[in-house]
Image (cartoon, rainbow, N blue to C red):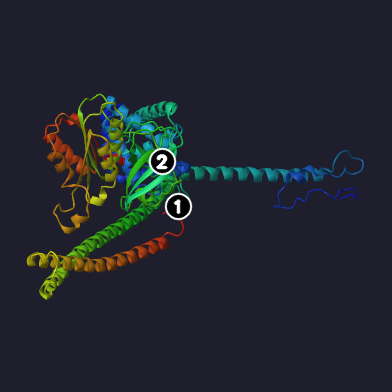
Amino acid sequence: MDAQRLKHSFDRVARQGDSVAMFFYSDLFVRNPHLRDMFPIGMSGQRDKLLRALGHIVAQVDDLPALVPFLRQLGRDHRRFGIVAEHYPHVGASLLATLRHFTGDDWTDDVESDWNAAYSLVAKVMLEAADEDALSRPAWWNGQVVAVERRRFDIAVLRVQPDRPLPYLPGQSVALEVPSRLRHWRYYSMANAPRPDHTVDFHVRLVDGGPVSPVLVRGTEAGDRVRMGAPVGTLTLDEESPRDVLLAAGSTGLAPLKAILEQISRRPVPPRVHLFFGARTRDGLYDLEHLTKLACEFRWLTVVPAVSDEPGGHDLSAVFRSGDVEYGNLSDVVAGHGPWDGHDAYVCGPSAMVGHTVEQLTRLGVARDRIRLETFTEAQR
Amino acid sequence: MSALNPPNLPVVSEGSRLTPGELRSVVFARAALGRRGYDEEQVRNFLAHVERELVLIYNDKAALADEVNRLRAQVAQGGAPGVMAPEDAHFQAVRILSQAQQTADLYVADAERYTRELAHEARLHREAILADAKGRAEHMLEDAHRKAAEVADAAVRAAPPPPARPVPLPDDERRAMEREIAYLRTYSDVYRTHLRSYLEALLRNVDEWESSERASLPGRSPD
């Protein structure tokens, strides 16, 4: 396989953008109509994903140590979609047909054999990882919603009972699918450390116009069913570290950090922990009540709530408020409480908030490798 | 023809085709008296008929072979109008499916945009209601304060001379207290009235909201 020739060939095809992915899926479905049901009705997101994944694979095709972990995760991820070994040759055939179609007269036997070799490798690595994964885990977990608590008109906390133990590390997330939006998977973090009864909590914020979150927040009741993929994510507690801990959560980015907090609380001697919880407005601090209770219970925990879009003055409505919140962007509030050197920082929330917080922390001398983070966009893979 | 002729000799008129059934059921008449075998003329006629049939069959076969070759060539060349090579049919199917998918994607995107806009408007509406409520609350407090202050001042001005008391308060202090009492009484009065009417309005709002939400969700519809 000639990596350079392959990259060159892909660049030429990829320039034609969405129509490439469109052709690929149509070709796949014309040849294998039974595969259509494995995909959502709207396919634009799916096509983007395909092109991104292909681009990623081709870019790293000559760097196997980097490519293999990506492919292995891709293979494991595909288990929950019900993709099995016999689907891979169909995909390969349609991929080759697509590339041939968009390459036109420049399609040569050499190029074809490059692509064949590349696809065989990709399929082999993905399948091996999927098969290995299948030895220890199901392709998905079925879950039943056992409690729904609507904290605001657009924020809900759901408790789900999986049909079998769901092992995960606090801070990780699972892809979630609801029966009324089949084939739409969205990632949500478990908001608790593993419990003896295996139940997990999810903090869901309604995304306007989104397919899944409105159903979870406004249309889900106890007894409803969900499906969950295997837990993933690297925003997990560094158990070896003796350092104090800074947790910075924006909105429902609180969920993974709360799980980490719970894990810390189970240590015999917890480190000092500062938890910053930010939202645009006060009513966005949907879990402050519980956090305040935790802060009273644990001497090692300090909770600092902050709101960014409300004036900090002493207007009359301040009379109706209880407790103290700080005003300003979460990143500034966090920075104002520094210095944070000597801390491990865990940051989760909207990408702008995460970006600014990481920026502020590194400016204040926190080494980048002491900061673990996840953004919503990343979680929405 | 002799009377011994059987009735089922094939009719061999020109243009008619010989069938296998006819062939099987042929029975020739015995030869004329004094001769052995079948009637020679009948046999000769019949052989001639079979020969014609064979010629026809070979001709048909050749014509069909030509036709097959012609069609094969046509298919290989990419087809005549109305006849499509399998590869073209596939591309056509891919094209049609792509168009259908594009339409579906468009509808999904439109629906998404529509709900996003609706939700955005609802959010703005909600914020406006909250801002309005806050404004009203502030207005209520101010109004109560202003009225109470007026009443308090009036009370002090109109106060009758104090009756004798066991321990009379100093005049200033008494007046200040009366003022304070009148202020507080009026303040709470005005505030209560405002609050009651506002809460009633809010309740009506909530009722409307509830009934409209119920109307928009018949049963537990799939969202």
B197 w.r.t. A155: above or below: below
Q: Where is mark 2, residue-wise?
A: A160
Q: Residue at horizontal 15%, vertical 47%? A: A328
Residue A299: horizontal and vertical position, in percent?
A: 23, 34
Dot label at residue B81: 1
Q: Amino acid at mark 1?
A: Pro
Q: Nearer the viewer, residue B39 or B82?
A: B82
On screen, residue B66 versus residue A157, left or right, reads right
**Given the image, what chain letter belongs to the residue carrying mark 2?**
A
| CB contact under 8 Å: marks 1 and 2 | no
Residue at 34 percent of width and 66 percent of height? B204
In the picture, which quadrant includes the C terminus of chain B? bottom left
Q: Residue at x 90, y 50 (%)?
A: B3
Q: Secondary structure at mark 2?
A: strand
* Between marks 1 and 2 in the image, the one whose residue lies nearer the viewer: 2
Q: Position of residue A354 (x, y in %)?
A: 21, 40
Give me the C-alpha separation between circle 1 and circle 2.
61 Å
Q: Chain of mark 1?
A: B
Q: Farthest residue in the right direction?
A: B34
* Res B145 visible: yes
Identified by mark 2, the residue type is Val
Q: How many marks?
A: 2
Nearer to the camera, B216 or B144: B144
Residue A155 image position (x, y, % from top left): 32, 49
Q: Is residue B31 left or right of residue B19?
A: right
**Which x, y percent locates residue B60?**
61, 45
